[in-house]
Image (cartoon, rainbow, N blue to C red):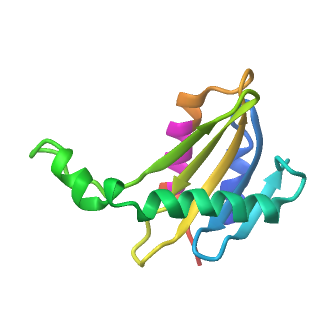
Amino acid sequence: MPGIDECLLDIMKLPGARGAAVVDWTSGLALGTIGESPHDDHEATAAETAEVARMAAEQPAFAQESARAAAPPEDPPASGVEDVIVTSPAGYHILRFVETDFDSSVFVHLWLHRSEGNLALARIRLGELARRLVLA
């Protein structure tokens, strides 16, 4: 199971990946970064994306109960927000929440070039990497 550095290296192998970070959304601090940042400042970007992640994670409309109620009875209970995708003319920002055995407030932020990247592939791969990420 990869740690933060290994996870970030794997993320940067995705076609069109411009930069990535593992961020704590309660503090807004980057736990690890790689590649470019939209403002050439990974810490500022971490704080800004943490605001978006916190907003999505704390909204009642996206709460675990809402997700569970919408799922068919045969499906396992959903855990709420999995990811947030923000599009801009030049790229995509994917915020993927990391589930852990403890009360996790960590997400992975991928900045993807719009014309070189594949949003669907990146979202799937980011989910796989987030599930394998070991936070120690």
Relative side of 33 to 98, left or right: right
Q: Quadrant of residue 117?
A: top right
Q: Quadrant of the C terminus?
A: bottom right
Seen at 70% across and 59% down, the residue is 48
Seen at 67% across and 46% down, the residue is 110
Seen at 19% across and 45% down, the residue is 70
Residue in the foreground of this view, choosing between 32 and 57:
57
Residue in the foreground of this view, choosing between 68 and 89:
89
Q: Position of residue 126 (x, y in %)?
A: 56, 45
Would residue 2 be visible to someone looking at this image?
A: no
Q: Quadrant of the N terminus?
A: bottom right
Q: Position of residue 125 (x, y in %)?
A: 55, 40
Picture layout, residue 6 above or below residue 127 = below
Q: Position of residue 113 (x, y in %)?
A: 75, 31
Seen at 27% across and 54% down, the residue is 78
Q: Quadrant of residue 64?
A: bottom left
Residue in the foreground of this view, choosing between 118 and 58:
58
70 in the magenta segment:
no
Relative side of 84 to 15, left or right: left
What span is in magenta?
A: 123-130
